[in-house]
């Protein structure tokens, strides 16, 4: 039977955290007289490399026409469809039903007015889904827009929140 293991952490200052590991068990298993075997491990500078306390800004972009139809989820669905060769596999990989994935693609096609996928149903050679050139262009434009918007967002954030950022 495994002995219970208790680990506690105590923050001593911004850069040091002390973890105390206490193992309580059968005295015969540890060669002790039944007392706790306690070891303390100090991790100096654990937080020095991770500035988890710094403020930052983030955003999420959704493209709309009559309604929203393209955002991070649809973008990832199309990426996976391209990588895995089928919408069905992409949906499965994302933990999404095929019906939901097909509906997202259909909404995108209606909003853009162009096909997004070229498909071939199964058979001896198996089925596939390929992105149309319009879908690939949309993915490229979305990624480029996000990259540029992220740069601008961080500049504006720095301008307005510099007093809080150290």
Image (cartoon, rainbow, N blue to C red):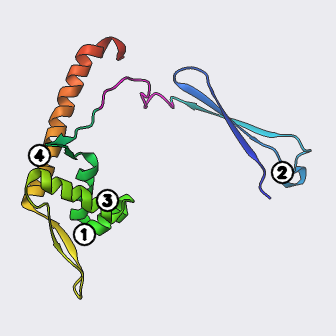
Q: Residues within 10 Å of mark 3 (few under 14, many from 20)?
A: few
Based on the picture, tell me whether residue 48 belongs to the magenta stretch. yes
Residues 54 and 103: in front is 103
Earlier in the chain: of badge 4 and badge 1, it is 1
The residue shown at (13%, 60%) is 116
Residues tagged 4 and 3 counted as in contact (Cβ below 8 A): no
Tell me which segment is drawn in magenta.
Answer: 46-58
Between the C-alphas of marks 4 and 3, the distance is 24 Å
How many discs appear? 4
Q: Which residue is mark 1?
A: 86
Does residue 44 lie above or below 64 as drawn? above
Between the C-alphas of marks 4 and 2, the distance is 63 Å
Q: Is disc 2 placed on a helix, strand or loop?
A: helix
Q: Position of residue 126 (x, y in %)?
A: 24, 81
Q: Which residue is mark 3?
A: 100
Q: Residues within 10 Å of mark 4 (few under 14, many from 20)?
A: few
Q: Which residue is mark 2?
A: 30
Earlier in the chain: of badge 4 and badge 3, it is 3
Between the C-alphas of marks 3 and 1, the distance is 14 Å
Between the C-alphas of marks 2 and 1, the distance is 56 Å
Between the C-alphas of marks 2 and 3, the distance is 56 Å
Q: Which residue is mark 4?
A: 141
The residue shown at (34%, 17%) is 165
Residues 47 and 45: in front is 47
Picture disc at residue 37: none
């Amino acid at each position: 039977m495994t002995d219970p293991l208790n680990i506690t952490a105590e923050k001593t200052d911004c850069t040091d955290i002390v973890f105390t590991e206490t193992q309580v068990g059968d005295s015969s298993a540890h060669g002790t007289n039944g007392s706790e075997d306690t070891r303390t491990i100090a991790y100096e500078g654990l937080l020095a490399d991770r500035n988890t306390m710094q403020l930052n800004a983030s955003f999420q972009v959704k493209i709309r026409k009559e309604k929203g139809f393209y955002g991070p989820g649809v973008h990832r669905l199309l990426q996976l469809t391209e990588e895995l060769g089928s919408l069905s596999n992409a949906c499965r990989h994302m933990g999404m039903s095929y019906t939901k994935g097909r509906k997202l693609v259909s909404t995108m096609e209606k909003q853009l007015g162009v096909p997004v996928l070229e498909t071939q149903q199964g058979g001896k050679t198996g089925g596939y889904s390929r992105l149309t050139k319009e879908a690939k262009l949309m993915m490229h434009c979305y990624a480029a827009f996000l990259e540029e918007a992220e740069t601008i967002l961080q500049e504006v954030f720095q301008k307005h929140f510099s007093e809080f950022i150290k």
